[in-house]
Amino acid sequence: MRKTQLINELTSYLKEDDTSFIHDFLSEMDRDYLSLYTPPEIAEHIQMSRQVEPEHPISLNIKPLDEGQFRITIVAFDYFSGFSILCGLLSSFGLDIVSGEVHTYSDRTIRKIIDVLHIRTTNHEGVFDLPQQESFKEEFQILEQLLGREHYREARKRVNDRLVAYLGQIEGSVPGLKKNLFQPITVRFNNTVSRKWTLLDIHGQDSPFFLYAFSNALAMRNIYLHKIKIKKKGQEIEDRFYISDRRGKKIKKEEDKKALRISAILIKQFTYFLTGAPNPTMAIGHYDQFLDKILEAGHSRPLLSFLRQRKTMRVLARLFGTSQFLWEDFLRTQFNNLLPILEQFNEQELQIGKSVTRRALHRRLKSVSVLEEKKRVLNDYKDQELFRIDMKHLIEPPGDLTHFSEALTDLAEVVINQVYQLCHRHLEEQHGTPLKEDGTICRFSICGLGKFGGRELGYASDIELLFIYEGSGRTRGKDAGGKGSIDNRVYFEKLARDIIHFIQAKKEGIFDIDIRLRPYGESGRLAFPFSLFTSYYDATGDAAPFERQALIKLRKVAGNRHFGETCESARNQFVYSQHPWDLRTAVALRERQINELVPKERVSVKYSPGGILDIEYLAQYLQIIHGHQQPGLRTSNTLKALHQLSLHKIIPAETGRNLQRIYLFLRTLIDALRIVRGNAKDLILPETRSEEFTFLGRRMGYGQRDWEKGRCELESDIQGHMSEAHEVFASLFWERDAPS
């Protein structure tokens, strides 16, 4: 049809005397466009284009075809990543693009896009009715407005979350969801056909939501889509993308083509595993950055083959979608260790044992001789093992908390023992062996407290220590003349300080050495003699009741084993004696924690009624009250204490089992909070209707298929468990008129 004849027809359809905007529109369109559509269809596009304004960024028309199939025509502003956002939204409504054409053009300097798509329903009901169509229009309008404000990440996150929630609901019920995911896809570049753009031709087996996954991958690599032809033949896709970089330039360099081909295919495949990520948007963003690091470092065929494996994709989705803080640490220090850890993931247990850890650390330390180099090697090994243990715990099903705690505790004990030996040897070389006043060797012990003492370390737990030496005296000196001899007090103070400084925490609270529970706290010595230990914690000593209670957790971890046992025996005399214990003061302290340390109308997993302190204090109060008669109660581990309390019929067996179950739940909840926030301090629950709370639930295994249901279940479980724990605590210790 001649252009003049077409303009005349369009003028009659549009009932307009002014034909300038028709001329402008047609001048922007290529021959493909003019050959694809009839005059009435072109007139519809022009009419829709004139309706697109900043306040109404889309014009949309949906026409039903055969059963479960529709033709969708959309005219909108041509925002970057707009097509991938559209594809994701269609997919989240259970719609699949069968074929279509996408065109972009300028409307008086403003870029617009026309999408003409043949879609079909893929949901169980085969329904895309009027209420759903209205919902689709409303959501698409919101997404376009976000893109118009250049809030690309927010728009991508919104559509990602919708799609992953939908995928979670249908996963396992839709045949072939991941059937063709890893089938080869041919990606070809052509820079000769089009004068302005690079042609990207895709050919291969179709998979559900392919267009979203692939176009999103291109958008994440800053590729702009100018025109698209979508075609399927049975299960085969034959799509053509007309692309450029964000500056409008062709993709010409071979290394750029290769990088784009690899990353686009991998991101496309990775998209299907986002259902296993606690935070899907975080996961795919981190995966994109991960690919940048891979491409910067140079890629090999075995590496790419490994990354394409289902197992690898599944592991990376969970790892990358859990914690911003863990990711930042990984990028900074552990990138080179990730792939070896992943390759050994199924072969190596979470808890490898102290002997294996000790041998591995010794092998590394043998490679260097200078103390400062040994410090670097030891801390590198510590951080790598921490990362391996954290990653293993993250990826394995929730509930394996005991093994996680033991693995962290084993690592901490090996590291502290090795640091003690290195620092002690270094000081001995300068000052000689410390001796008591009777000339015998002055023994030394490092004791753990808190979660470390109880072998209950979690993510971001600090390492609470006491440094105790046997008594007064002097060091022998470094030669026969006693040169360099110093007082034992000075020697062990230097030793404690050296140990603390030798172990470098990656960030506050993660493997951080805490010595605040020493006698007299911040004003006390770092290391103190056994005589001060016994006089301070004795029933008539200066220790507050809560300090003696804290000694329940005391456990020897390094130094002289026999002297450590002496310290534990002395502890038993302080804590498990028949001297009266001020239970009323202890309970009053717990009340003050509730009243003073919990923000109004918020829930602290630690301090609120039913928080983890209710269970820990319950066990400790009963250990103190009954421990002098029942030696089996003298354990530093809370779960073992609850078991022993049941065994000795101090609490009913069912109550003991319930408290153990609730304790593990709360510990898991605390770990999930800490690993997301990256510190040990903030244990206030997010608002229950917040996105953070939803992702917290997914981190714990809730809402894998239904996010809202998972959120509600987590909220219910938290309320139920904490109410039950507090009810037991209050029934045992609180007076009837005490607040609840």
Image (cartoon, rainbow, N blue to C red):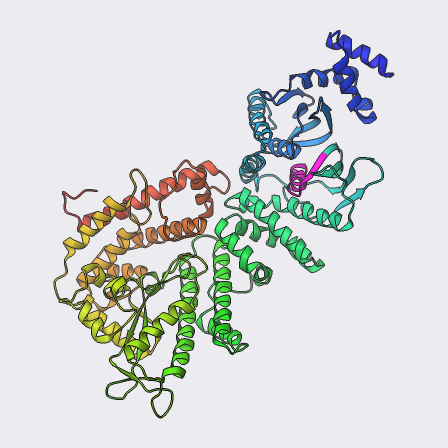
Q: Is residue 564 visible?
A: yes
Q: Nearer the viewer, residue 525 or 711?
A: 525
Give the residue at the far bottom of this rendering. 480
Residue 650 in the figure: left or right of residue 187: left
Side (left or right) of 91 relative to 620 = right
Rendered image quadrant of residue 585 = bottom left
The image position of residue 674, as x and y in percent, is 41, 51
x 28%, y 76%: residue: 489
Q: Quadrant of the N terminus?
A: top right
Q: Position of residue 224 (x, y in %)?
A: 70, 37
Quadrant where the C terminus sits is: top left
Who's the residue at 28% across and 59% down the image? 642
Quarter holding residue 434? bottom left
The reply to whether the magenta stretch includes residue 711 is no
**What span is in magenta?**
209-225
Where residue 138 appears, x then y in whole percent? 55, 24
Residue 654 visible, this angle:
no
User: Residue placed at 28% from the left, 80% from the top?
Assistant: 487
On screen, residue 23 above or below 497: above
Above/below status of 709 relative to 435: above
Q: How many labels, in total?
A: 0
* Position in image of residue 271 (x %, y %): 61, 43
Magenta-highlighted stretch: main secondary structure?
helix
Residue beneath the point at 39% across and 49% down = 669
Residue furthest out toward the right:
2
Q: Is residue 57 above or below residue 528?
A: above
